[in-house]
Image (cartoon, grey):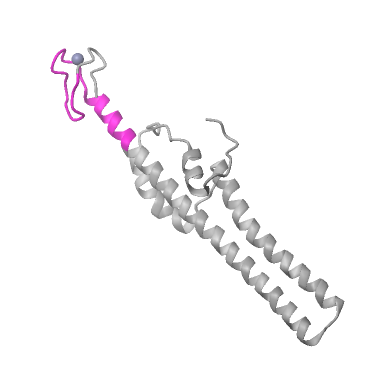
Amino acid sequence: MHCPNCGNEAPLDQKFCRRCGFNLAPVGDLMRTDDAAAAAVKLDRAKREALMVRHMFRWMAWGMGVLGIGVLMIVADKAFDFGNALKFVTALVMLGGIAMATYGVMSAMLKRDAGKWKVPAEDKHELQAPTTRQLAGGAVPAPVPSVTERTTELIGNRPSPKTD
Ligand SMILES: [Zn+2]
């Protein structure tokens, strides 16, 4: 870091500026707290991302399962010719499966873009233990880098509505 008084370079753990004697302890504390807060935020985001992916794949798996049932119904219809009623139900089931898989992907993406992904209660304790300690004392968390980069990295060429 640099001394706020004279601009002289000083290591983070130095208590006083070697050139002007300015008290550097509060500055060093603040910067270390910011680093810790940034690390906690990063952990929080990694955790949320993992939850989001789990949620997405769970819904996709259910959707695929329902679609599979629809395919079985088509096969059954071909074999036994149950008529138009079954064809209609089959179409509904398959549409439902597609809707479920789509919901999994869409909700995950929308919530992540909005930064509103909620951590379930059972994961919250584990997550907040370090966060609470490091943010104690009303420290303001360091500015979080945009999620856009990570989103782009994960979804490839999907155009982002954000322009930051
Ligand atoms: Zn100084």
In the rendered view, tell whether residue 27 sits above or below residue 116: above
Q: Is residue 27 left or right of residue 99?
A: left
Is 10 colored magenta in this rendering? yes
Where residue 129 appears, x then y in whole percent? 37, 49
Q: How many marks?
A: 0
Q: Which residues are magenta?
A: 9-35
**Residue displayed at 70% across by 75% down:** 71
Where residue 135 appears, x then y in whole percent? 37, 38
Q: Specify the farthest residue to the bottom.
A: 80
**Residue displayed at 47% across by 51% down:** 49
Q: Quadrant of residue 79?
A: bottom right
Where residue 109 appears, x then y in whole percent? 58, 48
Q: Is residue 141 left or right of residue 93?
A: left
In the rendered view, tell whether residue 3 sits above or below residue 45: above
Q: Quadrant of ligand 1?
A: top left
Who is closer to the viewer here, 161 or 13? 161
Who is closer to the viewer here, 38 or 87? 87
Is 93 colored magenta in this rendering? no
The answer to whether residue 52 is visible is yes
Q: Is residue 4 left or right of residue 129?
A: left
Instruction: Quarter of the image for the N terminus: give it.
Output: top left
**Residue displayed at 69% across by 79% down:** 72
Where residue 24 appears, x then y in whole percent? 21, 22
The answer to whether residue 135 is visible is no
**Residue displayed at 42% across by 49% down:** 46
